[in-house]
């Protein structure tokens, strides 16, 4: 009897650990598998075709809301009309099911973007909701399920539910989560997601729109393994903690939350590689009591470039920022745009995290800021990861260098096996045919998002400016298209200007930095200049467009900036055998 009781206790403890909002000591890494208007890039069939690669690095993939929103094109699904019909702008329901099943078979779970704050009607009548059947039961919302302070009442409608328990949402009807019928509909919808379609968890959209206790109640019924709420706030870390605690059922937390506080800290620090001490500011992932419930991120579809109204995108040091969240406790969520732009580096960063055995509750051994950078040491189950940001230094005795990039170095304990990093192959860069570098030309290329127009370029070093001396710089010209986007080229006209002036001066040194900018607030960060570099908006130089004038042995690289064929900065001490770009020419090491 005692042995049976002990086995039962262990089983119950394991289930409790899994059911409390987010698994304890979770070692997984999540990918946000979309961005705004990514219909072609991230349709279900295209995602499924990448399952072999993605499943090697990501344990979870968050996808857009798959419920039918009365439109099969150009609709991200954030105003759902149906909950049990799952055709969308990203593909058919059959394609969705196939994609989920394929990833599940490879050990990668799919997280649904759950929108239950509001619901849209089937036609021009704002309160005419879909009538649906699931498992033989009919489900439909009525005017009694809509908050009585919903904006529809200002347009001649009569919603008769209780007052909203959170912030209002314009453009779709706010659901009254105190309503028994709303709860019945939501519980059936979540059951459909988990037990019919095969999702493993939920990303709850706009949870500030209704009381946290309702997320707790829904999860307590549905019992997802993973749940994370988008509690977007500028009110500080305490507000997010209050939301997490608000999901408790019988004293047990029912959901994790995105670590927006850490996101804003990351912006303040990595935008200019300064203010390093802000990485120690309050955040879920900095708090041992809440790191388990922290889902960390650098950017997402709403905050990053390309969103309808981006809020605080990070344009610089993106690779280093991802290294930071992939070293920290919490569950890191990598944005698809960053994965696409910095794939080799992020693959290696993930492998380092997993090799060391870092999980969402790993202990932070050291987090020291200085004027030069930041030293972070986190203990994993198999060894420690030591991350140096900026130009920070510390003793590395007992550690070995795993990888490095601009403004970061990742070390691991000597006993950690990082041989898997050697299997990560560099992607060969093939320049579009429209990109040509003429002999002796100083230039750069930019594959601009469709939202960019009239692209201009700002190029400089500490001694002079190469682009008119007056912001926003020199005009670029369209030379062709690639991936459905315009490719712009900037070419230096031979003139230099005194910094912050339109006064012409003699050239003094080579270009060091470059910014591409479009209309309004659209611009990249301060990017390292590479002659003939091919850039994207995320700040990645994807490769060098250049011819081989003379292949020769490596010259002295003192005071020169070195790039590999993917356009990444390389320190001379890290050069292996191969071809590099030095002073705009290909050379062999």
Image: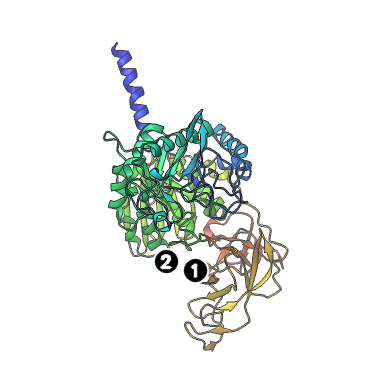
Determine which quarter of the picture holds residue 152.
bottom left
Left or right: 329, with 299 as reference point: left
Q: Nearer the viewer, residue 457 or 421?
A: 457
Do labels 2 and 1 touch, CB within 8 Å?
A: yes
Pick the residue in front: 184 or 202: 184
Relative to the observer, which residue lies in front, 449 or 317?
Answer: 449
- Give the Cα distance between marks 2 and 1: 8 Å
Mark 1 falls on what kind of element?
loop
Q: Element under label 2?
A: loop
Q: Residues within 10 Å of mark 1 (few under 14, many from 20)?
A: some
Residue in the image at 35% along x and 50% along y = 148
Q: Quadrant of residue 246?
A: top left
Describe residue 379's horizontal placement relative to residue 103 as left or right. left
Residue 342 image offset from top left, x and y in percent: 54, 54
Can you give x and y, in whole percent of width and height, for residue 123 in the image? 53, 49
Residue 541 visible (yes or no): yes
Residue at x-position 36% and y-position 52%: 376
Say how the picture is coloured: rainbow
Q: Residue 518 bears which disc, if any?
A: none
Residue 394 vertical position relative to residue 420 in the rendered view, above or below: below
**Does any portion of residue 329 appear in the rendered image?**
no
Q: Nearer the viewer, residue 60 or 504?
A: 60
Estimate the x, y position of residue 106 in percent, counting from the top left. 56, 34
In this rendering, would 475 be left or right of 498? right
Badge 2 density bin: few <14, some 14–19, many ≥20, Cα 10 Å? some
* Residue 230: x %, y % from top left: 40, 49
Q: Which residue is mark 2?
A: 272
Which residue has dot 1 on it?
526
């Amino acid at each position: 009897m005692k042995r049976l009781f002990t086995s039962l206790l262990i089983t119950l403890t394991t289930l409790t650990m899994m059911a409390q909002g987010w698994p304890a000591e979770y070692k997984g890494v999540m990918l946000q598998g979309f961005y705004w208007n990514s219909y072609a890039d991230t349709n279900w069939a295209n995602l499924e075709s990448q399952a072999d690669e993605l499943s090697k690095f990501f344990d979870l993939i968050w996808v857009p809301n798959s419920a039918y929103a009365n439109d099969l094109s150009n609709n991200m699904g954030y105003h759902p009309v149906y909950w049990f019909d799952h055709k969308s702008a990203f593909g058919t329901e059959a394609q969705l099911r196939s994609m989920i099943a394929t990833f599940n078979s490879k050990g990668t779970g799919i997280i649904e973007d759950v929108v239950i704050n509001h619901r849209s009607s089937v036609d021009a009548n704002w309160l005419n909701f879909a009538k649906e059947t699931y498992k033989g039961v009919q489900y439909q919302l009525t005017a009694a399920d809509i908050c009585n302070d919903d904006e529809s009442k200002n347009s001649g409608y009569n919603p008769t539910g209780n007052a909203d328990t959170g912030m209002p949402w314009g453009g779709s009807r706010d659901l009254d989560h105190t309503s028994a019928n709303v709860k019945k509909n939501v519980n059936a919808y979540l059951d459909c997601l988990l037990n019919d379609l095969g999702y493993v968890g939920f990303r709850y959209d706009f949870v500030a729109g209704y009381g946290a206790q309702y997320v707790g109640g829904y999860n307590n019924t549905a019992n997802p393994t993973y749940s994370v709420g988008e509690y977007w706030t500028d009110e500080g870390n305490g507000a997010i903690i209050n939301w997490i605690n608000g999901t408790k059922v019988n004293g047990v937390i029912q959901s994790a939350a995105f670590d927006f506080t850490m996101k804003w800290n990351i912006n303040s620090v990595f935008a200019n590689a300064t203010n390093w001490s802000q990485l120690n500011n309050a955040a879920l992932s900095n708090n041992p009591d809440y790191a388990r419930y922290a889902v960390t991120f650098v950017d997402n579809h709403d905050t990053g470039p390309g969103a309808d109204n981006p809020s605080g995108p990070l344009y610089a040091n993106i690779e280093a920022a991802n290294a930071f969240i992939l070293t920290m406790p919490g569950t890191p969520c990598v944005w698809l745009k960053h994965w696409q732009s910095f794939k080799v580096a992020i693959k290696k960063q993930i492998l380092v995290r997993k090799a060391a055995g870092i999980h969402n509750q790993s202990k932070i051994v050291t987090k020291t800021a200085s004027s030069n950078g930041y030293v972070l040491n986190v203990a994993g189950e198999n060894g420690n990861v030591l991350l140096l940001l900026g130009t920070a230094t510390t003793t590395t005795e007992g550690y070995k260098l795993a990888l490095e990039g601009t403004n970061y170095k990742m070390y691991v304990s000597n006993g950690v096996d990082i041989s898997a990093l050697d299997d990560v192959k560099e992607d060969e860069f093939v320049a579009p045919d429209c990109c040509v570098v003429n002999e002796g030309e100083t230039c750069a290329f930019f594959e601009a998002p469709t939202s960019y127009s009239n692209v201009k370029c700002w190029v400089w070093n500490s001694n002079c400016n190469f682009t008119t001396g007056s912001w926003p710089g020199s005009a670029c010209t369209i030379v062709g298209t690639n991936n459905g986007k315009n490719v712009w080229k900037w070419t230096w006209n031979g003139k230099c200007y005194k910094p912050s002036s339109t006064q012409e001066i003699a050239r003094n040194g080579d270009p060091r930095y470059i910014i591409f900018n479009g209309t309004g607030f659209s611009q990249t960060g301060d990017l390292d200049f590479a002659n003939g570099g091919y850039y994207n908006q995320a700040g990645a130089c994807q490769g060098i467009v250049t011819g081989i004038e003379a292949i020769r042995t490596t010259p002295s690289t003192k005071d020169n900036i070195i790039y590999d064929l993917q356009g990444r900065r390389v320190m001379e001490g890290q050069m292996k055998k191969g071809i590099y770009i030095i002073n705009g020419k290909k050379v062999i090491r």
